[in-house]
Amino acid sequence: MDDNPVVTKRDQRLARGELEALIMDVLWNQEGWLTPADVVAVLENRHPVAYTTAITILVRLWDKGMVERRASGRGFAYHPVLTRDEWAAQRMHELLSTAGNRSAALSHFVETLDAKQLGQLRRAIKPRRRT
């Protein structure tokens, strides 16, 4: 039996959601507005994508409201609507809203936090309690 399986080009392809996440990472890590060519250049060594694929994914992200775009030459440049942290908070809120028992879901979440994270959560909640 061969210990080195053959990796095909198809095996190296990312699922659409993973590719969207990869492109969002590029947009969050770079400052300013990026064109599809900029995204392709950043991903060149990490996970090469075709220019047309970058355009397709950026348009999908724009359709979903995750990025904004503005004219740049004959095409568009893109920028995230939310920061990575704001997006994560929004996702947590969305996931919590799908829980059958929000209180239980929050309790289970808090149980997974380490001491440092619990301290951060307490500091974040403290100002809200005063209002």
Image: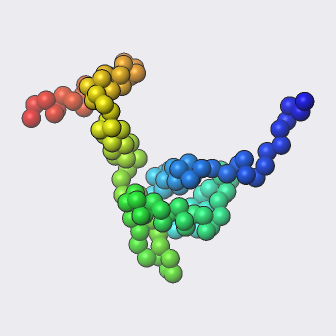
Regarding residue 109, the answer to whether it shows in the image is yes
11 displayed left or right of 58: right
Taking the spot 47% from the left edge, 69% from the top edge, the residue there is: 77
Q: Position of residue 20 (x, y in %)?
A: 52, 53
Q: Position of residue 100 (x, y in %)?
A: 31, 31
Q: Position of residue 10 (x, y in %)?
A: 73, 52
Regarding residue 121, the answer to whether it shows in the image is no
Near-viewer residue (70 or 91): 91
Q: Quadrant of the C terminus?
A: top left
The answer to whether 69 is drawn above or below residue 31 in the figure is: below
Taking the spot 50% from the left edge, 77% from the top edge, the residue there is: 75
- The picture quadrant where one finds residue 49 is bottom right
- The picture quadrant where one finds residue 119 is top left
Near-viewer residue (14 or 88): 14
Taking the spot 36% from the left edge, 25% from the top edge, the residue there is: 109
The single residue placed furthest to the front in the displayed view is 100
The single residue placed furthest to the right in the displayed view is 1
The answer to whether 30 is drawn above or below residue 51 in the figure is: above
- The picture quadrant where one finds residue 66 is bottom left
Near-viewer residue (105 or 30): 105
55 displayed left or right of 46: left
Q: Position of residue 85 (x, y in %)?
A: 37, 43
The answer to whether 117 is drawn above or below residue 8 in the figure is: above
Taking the spot 85% from the left edge, 35% from the top edge, the residue there is: 4
Q: Quadrant of the N terminus?
A: top right
2 displayed left or right of 46: right
